[in-house]
Image: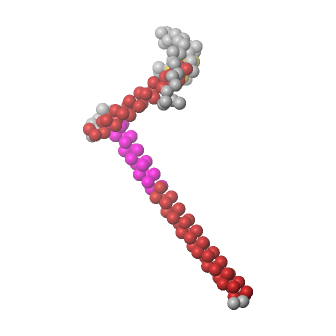
Amino acid sequence: MSIMDDLSKFAKSVSSNASNMVKKSGEMIELTRLNIAIQAEEDKIKLAQNEIGANIFAKFNKGETVDCDIIEYCNSIIQVQNEIEEIQLKITKLKNMHICEKCGQEVGLNTGFCPKCGEKRAAEESVPKPDIEYQKTEENV
């Protein structure tokens, strides 16, 4: 075998491998595109499921009848919402603020009127010092 024959075989091999790589790359791109399309469709399903849940919870909050299997989930949501409100109240107190009873705006404790709605602060709301104690637990570490 001559060097020319070896070079020719090598060139054919390189060409064949390059063609295979181009083909495989194209297949990979198409697989990625299809997987992205599947993910987009699954996201649509999740959004629809969330909307279903939100609509059922809204009915529950209005006192409308909902499936008895759903009531436990709705009660869980209410419990979590209450916990969030308690945490937000602690944050407000730590910031030396209070929440306007009329509009919900955060207002400084030394402010007599709400800057958003003009509501006068209730007289019984003296300037309390935050009595919040931060306790280091496994949950907040």
Residue at 71% x, 84% y: name it. 7
The picture places residue 1, in percent across and down from the top left corner, at 69, 90
Q: Is residue 74 left or right of residue 94?
A: left
Where residue 103 sits: x, y (%)?
A: 49, 24
Residue that appears at 34% across and 35% down: 74
Quarter occupied by residue 115: top right
Q: How far from the left and from the top, in percent, is residue 56? A: 34, 40
Residue 74 among magenta residues: no
> Can residue 107 be seen at all in this image of the molecule?
no
Looking at the picture, does residue 69 appear above or below residue 33?
Answer: above
Residue occupying the point 52% across, 10% down: 126
Image position, residue 62 (x, y; %): 33, 33
Q: In this view, does 100 lie above or below 48?
A: above
Q: What stretch is highlighted in magenta?
A: 40-59
Judged by its main secondary structure, the magenta piece is helix
Residue 66 appears left or right of 128 = left
